[in-house]
Image (cartoon, grey):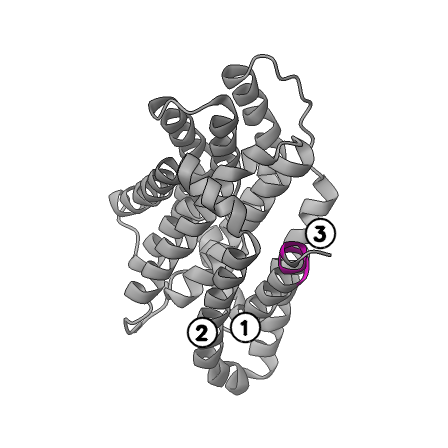
Amino acid sequence: MTAAELIGKVFLPLSLAIIMLGMGMTLVPADFTRIVKFPKAFLIGLTNQLIFLPIIGFLLAITFDLSPVMAVGVMILATCPGGATSNLITQVCKGNIALSVTLTAFASVVSIFTIPFILSYALAYFDSTTDIAIQLPVLDTIVQIMGITVIPISIGMLIRKYKTNFAKRMEKPMRTASTIIFILVFIAVLGANAAILVDGMKAAGLVTLVLNLVTMGVGYLTAKLFKLKLESVISITIESGIQNGTLAFVIATSILNNIEMGIPIGAYSIWMFITGGILMWQFGRRTVTASV
């Protein structure tokens, strides 16, 4: 197993699962029932994720006049849902964690059906000579969501329920640990993918930066437009602009069998960690007096 495979298949999932456990210790069932009772924030976030993001990616691919391979790589990113990394960033930013987790889980399941449809169109539009049937691994995707997100968070919530004082004491240390793990993962990703990242920045650095900034900007503006509380604005901003790079890379290299399509994904991963780190630094310092 190569260093990149070890990081992607073992270190990263395990680290994120531990973070999700700590995240669960900050949540109670009422955090999720509020989303059902007041679904506006959830619907706004989902609309951004499933509709606006692919449109933005498509327009950017045309505007930057990307080659067919680079254009499809950008479209892969734009169709992917948020991942556990977006939940991590939301936690450190003191956003609405329940909203972030719910959006990630729901968008991940729905994207099993939307990604093949959108990418089939993108392949036909940007490269008419390509004829590939896109089928995402439904079971593997659901298992990934359950193993990295749902189960650890559920265990954390049980700890919060039965060991409340312990869970409250661990809130600040776990947030600190999340920040440290975020930095370590970023360094590990840089080291393991140095070659492809250099090519990625040269070929698609600018367009992926614009994709990251515009999608976060749209998330922020739509959330503010509907007068959501700051915690929910933060969550929607992050969920709109931080995509599941691991899933995107799997689609490019394993399903479409094109390593070049992974080049924009490598570049995007760098910007994602940088902008996510800036948000963590900006919002993580503030004092929260009440939850959403």
Identify which amino acid the numbered label 3 is placed on. Val
Q: Position of residue 64 (x, y in %)?
A: 35, 26
Q: Which of the two discs, 3 and 2, labels the residue nearer the N terminus?
A: 3
Q: Which labelled disc corresponds to residue 8?
A: none
Label 3 belongs to which residue? 143
Label 2 belongs to which residue? 175
* Quarter placement of the C terminus: bottom left
In the image, is 276 to the left or to the right of 199? left
Q: Are the two marked residues, 1 and 2, in contact with CB atoms closer than 8 angstroms?
A: yes
Q: Position of residue 193 (x, y in %)?
A: 55, 51
Q: Residues within 10 Å of mark 1 (few under 14, many from 20)?
A: many
Secondary element at image label 1 = helix
Cα distance between the residues tagged 1 and 3: 20 Å
At x 25% / y 43%, what residue is drawn?
225
* Quarter placement of the N terminus: bottom right
Secondary element at image label 2 = helix
At x 33% / y 68%, what residue is drawn?
284
Identify which amino acid the numbered label 2 is placed on. Arg
Cα distance between the residues tagged 3 and 2: 26 Å
Label 1 belongs to which residue? 22
In the image, is 177 to the left or to the right of 278? right
